[in-house]
Image (tube, rainbow, N blue to C red):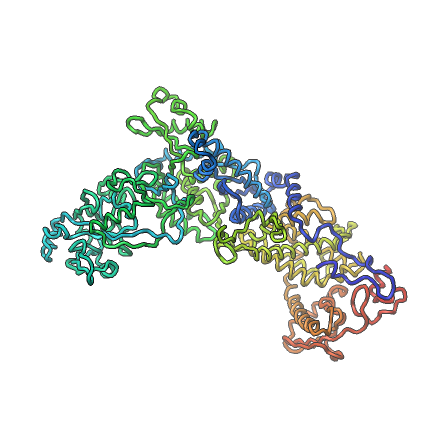
Amino acid sequence: MTASSAPDSTAAAGQISYKDTLNLLQTPFAMRANAKVREPEIQAFWAERQIYARLSQENAGEAFTLHDGPPYANGALHVGHALNKILKDIINKTALLQGKKVRFVPGWDCHGLPIELKVLQGLSSSERAELTPVSLRQKAHAYALEQVEGQKAGFRRWGIWADWDQPYLTLQKNYEAAQIGVFGAMVLAGHIYRGLKPVHWSPSSRTALAEAELEYPDGHTSPSVYAAFPVVELPEGLAAQLSASGLPAEAATGAGGLAVAIWTTTPWTLPANLAVSVNGRLDYAICAVAPRGEGAAPAASHLVVAAELREGLETSLGLTLTPLLTVKGAALEGIVYRHPLLERSSPVLIGGDYITTEAGTGLVHTAPGHGVDDFNTGKKAGLPVLCPVDEAGTLTAEAGPFAGTNVLKDANPTIIAALEATGLLLKQERYAHRYPYDWRTKKPTIFRATEQWFASVEGFRAAALEAIAAVEWLPASGRNRIEAMVSERGDWCISRQRTWGVPIPVFYHRDSGEVLLNEATLRHIQGLIAEHGADVWWQRDESGLLPGAYAAEAGQWRKGTDTMDVWFDSGSSWAGVLQERGLHYPADLYLEGSDQHRGWFQSSLLTSVAVNGHAPYKRVLTHGFTLDEKGRKMSKSLGNVVDPAVLVEGGKNEKQDPAYGADVLRLWVSSVDYSADVPLGPGIVKQLADVYRKVRNTARYLLGNLHDFDPRPQAEGGDAVPLAELPLLDQWMLQRTAALIDSVTGDFERYEFYRFFQALQNFCVVDLSNVYLDIAKDRLYVSGAAEFRRRSCQTVLSLVVERLAGLIAPVLCHMAEDIWQNLPYPVAEASVFERGWPTAPAEWRQPELEAPMAAILELRALVNRQLESCRAGGQLGASLEAQVQLDLTAGSEVLVEALGWLEHSPHHAVDNLADWLLVSGLRIGGAAPEAVLQEAEDAGVRVRIAKAAGQKCERCWHYETDIGSHSAHPTLCGRCVTVLAG
């Protein structure tokens, strides 16, 4: 709706101009947002008046804490950041408007390998050689702070409200001290231990990794091999059974006799083989082996394989496997086989239910140093933990002839070639499967047994599952996801072999290796870190770190060099932020991406439960990931990345990449069902910009028509018409506004922002622009400035625009404030956010108006279709050139009742069907007009369209029969003449 919709104002006959007699739009609220300039001005206004700070402290309602999961302090912000932080801001701004005390403390995760690597990459080789742990940490600290400032500026530009001057950083002294406190509490509760266990190890990062630091890219293949391990000794019972079946023990254990068949996708672990494991409950077949066709002689005369897999193995191995004897796996225990590549023999053991017949041979090559199941099986059997692989992934001297090869490079082909040379290789092939990669370096990991520090999840797993059940998960599937992860996870490896992090505050006896870690040492180190920061661990020697009671023996102790897993860092934020800063603990809400069920949600849960017995949150809301418009992951190689900075500020070529502003980015966040993955691309941005413009132009039309309106009641000298005296159309508009407020309030309370987006569009485009304002433009432009029909409309516009500003404020915060600053009359509140959440008085709520209005709007749509047909045929131009005649027949009872409702209105100057249909003449019943242009019937209503009688009024564009009756204004109708006279 624009001023161009107003009637033309210049009389053709003479020089009289009626332009100044119309009530045209007047407002400084521009049609174009100019967001690049205007949004920062609005943000400066908020900052100057301390809107967020004052509301967060002075609101009268309860406190509300949405705890910020810390993004990593590295790299430019992307649309995933935008989705996350804007969702949080929408929720916080809604809570502030609802009168709650909201303190949002933004955070950053500042330790860890990526920052350490960034620092190292920026140094020359000579500079690296001169690095000390302290100097490396200082450089990493400075780099992290620089990254924080860059990201902070981006978040603020998006209109995010937070304690920006007091964020939490995991490198802050008080935070690190609180983290040591969490670690210490878990130590004293018996949940922390040191042990030699296989862990996910990243040769590319040279450190242990947690589950949350792994990713599983598509397309990974491994070199899998089937191999025969020759049997050299049989248990008595099995030997007797085999002998009775025609295979004497001497033949079975002799050269080329019986072998156990294994399958592995990690040939590099074969030098670490110390056993073969079977499932005691499965059936195993001892088969005579013959080549198929003219194949080579088999590696063994007989093979042991799972009975269920025998037929498939015949095909895949190209062998004929004739069952000689079938036994349970338990009967195989006690077999001793010779290692196929090294001079040692090892036993067949009973493993667990992890041994299945889904793939392989049903017999599992077991290397206790390179797999969790292998480790557990070996531990039960008393096997040593052999791990002949160093931190770089290179096989050591314990791997015999394979020492010096790298497990991710040349070890596999070298070992496979050696296996082939022995004649014990049954088959090799590539095998596609899920395989863990280091999420930072994007390179494969391995399982490697090392001495690490662990949190024993077993010690509090049951309590963690109970805590999960007490939390509200949105969507509800989140509970199932995290329950499954916590139920199945092994102990949490919390130590890392890096420098940039919080130290594990432990001392080792230089001779015995005994660990010194107790309440006194923990409390002392926590105090030192609270005062000096974690650097103190590297700056001081043992005498400067140990408490006084150990000062005399400081020379006997060596401080540890491991740092804590960064997930322990961020997972301690409930202590370092919620408790430290006096916020709600448990927090009212955690909100992050769905990947955090294995990350921050889980690490926070485990530490909180281990220390305090309950979850750190009452409610957890998750969102999906951002994709392009085709549903693909965004990547630079595909050229489908949407840079939020370019979307907001524009690109180098602003014609190609215009500056849409932060509100369009925020509108996108509100428009998507974020519970699933969400798309964004140029086409979507343009659609959003169009919706944004429609809302803005609607607001501009409302403001522009209020330039001479005083919202005080008429009884107090203002212009506002009492609600009870409003025409039906105005009462219906307030009912629609009340319904919008009710639905949007529910949408925000349920965090279903996409429903708000849909309701906002429908309200602005349909209820306001297409219906109410379309009908009202004659009242607003043509009426006398102070006429009832105009003032009653202005009364509604002022009530609607103020509430519209409040409803959009959590999402379109800049536009909402811009509307508020451009209200053409004084209000008590300087900011829209000081008004509070919009409400509708009880007298607005008249749902009984909906049915008759719906019937009339259906008629209006029918008439509009016929008018459009006339326009398309060139028979009519504007709808005011037409007159309409209606015949109501059987089946139109609902409409008849609605027309009766309209007829009984005391305000016919507003509530009349001709004005609502935007035509110059209307007749119900009677004879058909002459020269009918268009005719249609629907639901008992016959509509006829004809040209209106009379001539066009030069001022209001209505066709009237009294044009020329007034000598002073020969081109005007009587109504317009009266307005000018008065």
Residue 910 located left or right of residue 40:
right
Residue 607 relative to residue 715: left or right:
left
- Name above or below for residue 156 compared with residue 951: above
Answer left or right for 536 relative to 509. right
Establish if 796 lies above or below 493. Answer: below
744 or 178, which is in the foreground? 178
- Of residues 123 and 976, which is closer to you in this image? 123
Instruction: Name the spot of residue 838 as percent of width and height, x first.
Output: 63, 51
Where residue 382 sits, quadrant-wise, is top left
> Is residue 485 placed above or below 733 in the rendered structure?
above
Q: Could you say where residue 971 lies in the image, as x and y percent from the top left?
A: 85, 67
Q: In which quarter of the image is residue 535?
A: top left
Q: How many labels does the image show?
A: 0
Which residue lies at the image location 64% right of the left edge and 64% below the top edge?
A: 850
List x then y, in percent, for residue 494. 38, 38
- For this orientation, the residue located farthest to the right is 967
User: Which residue is at a point 51% across and 53% down the rendered structure image?
Assistant: 639
Image-quadrant location for residue 19: bottom right
